[in-house]
Amino acid sequence: MSSFIPAGKTSSIRRGDSSLQIQTEYACRPSPRITTTVLHDGRVLHKFERKLESIIESLQEQNQIEEIIKRQHIDILSTIRSTPESKPLTIETPGEPSEEPSTHSVPTPPIDGELSIDSSVSDSLSIDPQLSLHERFAQIPGFEHCFQMDNDGQFKSSATESQFRKRFRKAFKSRLDLLEVFPTYESDPTRRESGVYEIERDRLFLISTGDSCLVISINPVGSQTNYEQIIKEASLPSGALDKR
């Protein structure tokens, strides 16, 4: 089984008094694929699968698949939002040939009253930028611990290193490769591009602030919480994230 697992995406779209949950994720069994599932109250309304030629075998391939996951997720969200309430909700296959029809009808959930698409998505949490970095992390639902490193992957203390190695042995061994997600600047090799990378879904996140790196662990408290977005707001509240 491949050890490279790309981060998935989860969003919630309000429809009248209820909501649809949209989840896009990668799976390698029984065959490698990217699947977007539309649910209402835990019931699957629609599932779209994009088959992949092979499992992910490198960090570079993992990053490429994450971009595909993001695009597929956004495409389906846009389709749902743009569908008039007077028409059945349909999702069009995003540009991949198939022997089956490319458009699949999504049953309308049995909700009393008319349905209308609300573009609001429960993806973020208000974070006070005036607080210290650790205080902002403490506001994140389910926040557990922050492990600080420098830009070369060396932990700030031997106790921190020992704790991280004990709890997340796999991530500890691969941390130097993971840091390459945020390249150093040619003009200043001591600094890295800033951003947030999901190591384990809704569980472990690598953060680059530019001058240093850190990993935070989460004990997820809800499937609809967009931890990646919340952590971006907490670690870089100004929104000045470098594009990767």
Image (tube, rainbow, N blue to C red):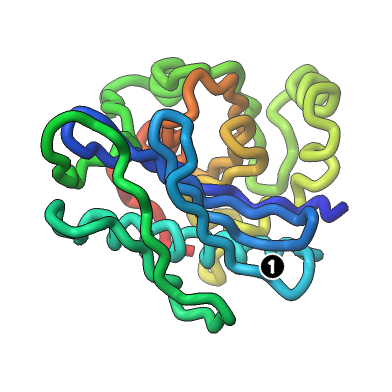
Identify the residue shown where x is 58% and y is 62%: 49
The quadrant in which residue 34 appears is: bottom right
Number of dots carrying numbers:
1
Q: Is residue 122 left or right of residue 16?
A: right
Relative vertical location of residue 177 with respect to residue 202 in this rendering, above or below: below
Q: Is residue 203 left or right of residue 138?
A: right
Identify the residue shown where x is 79% and y is 19%: 163
Secondary structure beneath disc 1? helix
Residue type indicated by callout 1: Gln
Label 1, residues with CA under 10 Å away: few <14, some 14-19, many ≥20: few
Residue 112: x and y in percent read 18, 29
Q: Nearer the viewer, residue 26 or 204?
A: 26
Residue 97: x and y in percent read 54, 83
Question: Is residue 122 visible to us here?
Answer: yes
The quadrant in which residue 92 appears is: bottom left
Residue to which mark 1 is pinned: 60
Residue 21: x and y in percent read 40, 39
The quadrant in which residue 132 appears is: top left
Identify the residue shown where x is 72% and y is 43%: 153
Q: Nearer the viewer, residue 122 or 134?
A: 122
Relative vertical location of residue 206 with respect to residue 128 in this rendering, above or below: below
Residue 100: x and y in percent read 54, 76
